[in-house]
């Protein structure tokens, strides 16, 4: 089975002398209905987050403030994306091992998720992740 590819989504951006505004609607700007939103903040310098993959959950990750880098591995190759614009998000399909690092001071990582939180949906062991990739062809 072929994996979906990650890609950057550019959200609507409304310029205003009072400041900019962006918004998203699930299933319209995001390729799934949103069932959960969480955000990561106060990340100490040098710390990394993530290091897991999901079985069903899909995500759009947004740097609502500051910047950080997301590394996505499909089991063979790793692609890295630096997010630093509040009007852009990275779509992360299922089946990618994700690691987030290089958080700038004061950055906020907001994640729009397709599923409610369930620990059963996580693969947190890298070898188990590699086994789950067998038979998935991204070439
Ligand atoms: P964790 O998955 O380790 O965060 P990261 O995305 O950096 O890998 O989650 C940290 C803790 O928070 C863990 O105990 C699970 C809990 N958690 C929830 O309760 N609900 C959620 O929606 C999320 C994302 C995590």
Image (cartoon, grey):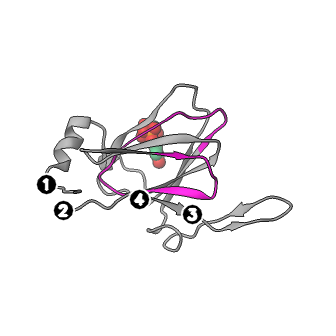
Does the beta carbon at disc 2 come under 8 Å from ligand 1? no
In whole angstroms, how far apart are the C-alphas of marks 1 and 3?
A: 32 Å
Q: Earlier in the sequence, mark 2 or mark 4?
A: 2
Q: Position of residue 44 (x, y in %)?
A: 58, 26
In whole angstroms, how far apart are the C-alphas of marks 2 and 1?
A: 7 Å
The circle on residue 135 is 1
Q: Position of residue 82 (x, y in %)?
A: 52, 44
For disc 3, the marked residue is 10
Q: Residue furthest right?
A: 17
Q: Position of residue 56 (x, y in %)?
A: 32, 57
In whole angstroms, how far apart are the C-alphas of marks 3 and 4?
A: 22 Å
Q: Mark 4, mark 1: which one is toward the viewer?
A: 1
Q: Which residues are magenta?
A: 81-108
Does 83 lie within the magenta span?
A: yes
Q: Considering the numbered disc 4 on the image, is that residue within a helix, a strand or a loop?
A: loop
The circle on residue 115 is 4
In whole angstroms, how far apart are the C-alphas of marks 4 and 1?
A: 25 Å
The C terminus appears in which quarter of the rendering? bottom left
Label 4–label 1 contact, CB within 8 A: no
Q: Quadrant of ligand 1?
A: top left
């Amino acid at each position: 089975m072929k994996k979906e590819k990650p890609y950057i989504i550019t959200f609507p951006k409304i310029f205003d002398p009072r400041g900019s505004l962006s918004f998203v609607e699930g299933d319209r700007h995001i390729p799934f209905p949103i069932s959960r939103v969480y955000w990561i903040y106060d990340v100490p310098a040098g710390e990394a987050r993530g290091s897991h993959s999901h079985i069903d959950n899909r995500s759009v990750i947004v740097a609502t403030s500051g910047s950080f880098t997301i590394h996505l591995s499909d089991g063979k190759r790793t692609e890295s994306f630096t997010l630093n614009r509040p009007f852009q998000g990275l779509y992360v399909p299922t089946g990618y091992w994700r690691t987030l690092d290089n958080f700038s001071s004061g950055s906020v990582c907001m994640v729009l998720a397709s599923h409610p939180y369930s620990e059963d949906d996580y693969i947190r062991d890298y070898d188990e992740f590699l086994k789950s990739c067998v038979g998935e062809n991204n070439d």
